[in-house]
Image (cartoon, rainbow, N blue to C red):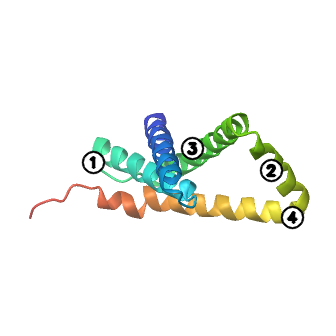
Amino acid sequence: MKKYILTFTAAYVITMLAVVAIESLFDLPSGTSMTCLIVGGFSAAASFVKDRQRVPNETEKKTLVWGCLLASIIISIIATLISIVVFPETLAFLKMAMTQLPSWVWLIAIAFTLLIHYLILALSFGWIAKYFLPKTTV
């Protein structure tokens, strides 16, 4: 499963860099997280199906979803740290946001975001993976 989690990670990071560059060039609003998650999930699912000629079973799907979710969290933390180093005003904004909103709001927002990420990854390795199966001729 490590190969497919690494495939997810590579696709996620490459997409993140591309989206950030496009957003910067055209002054667009940020939609990086979901775009990266979808591209990463679809890439890993396609790679899995191509290699094994089948969709992941329940155990594999669970491992892939949780592994990719963990990878996306780690990437997001690293991206935030890089943003703080490159753009020092990010830290001031984060501090302000954390003091302005109660903890329960943060917890609900984080839980909701993780749920959405989990659902997108579960769809990637379930329903969407079926689309990557080779079409058989009858």
Residue identified by numbered label 1: 53
Distance between mark 3 and mark 2 Cα atoms:
27 Å
Q: Nearer the viewer, residue 82 or 68?
A: 82
Position of 118 with respect to 61 (left or right) is right
Position of 45 with respect to 68 (left or right) is left
Point out residue 30 in the picture as x, y percentages from the top left corner.
Answer: 58, 58
Q: Earlier in the sequence, mark 2 or mark 1?
A: 1
Q: Earlier in the sequence, mark 4 or mark 3?
A: 3
Q: Earlier in the sequence, mark 1 or mark 3?
A: 1
Place residue 70 in its image quadrant: top right
Distance between mark 2 and mark 1 Cα atoms:
45 Å
Res. 32 mark: none
Asked if the residue under mark 2 is in contact with the one under mark 3, i.e. CB atoms within 8 Å, the reply is: no
Q: Tell me what residue is drawn at x 31 percent, y 44 percent.
A: 52
Residue identified by numbered label 2: 94
Point out residue 129 in the picture as x, y percentages from the top left corner.
Answer: 37, 57
Instruction: Give the amino acid type for the residue marked by disc 1 in the picture.
Output: Gln
Instruction: Give the amino acid type for the residue marked by disc 4 in the picture.
Output: Trp
The secondary element bearing badge 3 is classed as helix
The secondary element bearing badge 1 is classed as loop
The secondary element bearing badge 2 is classed as helix
Residue identified by numbered label 4: 104
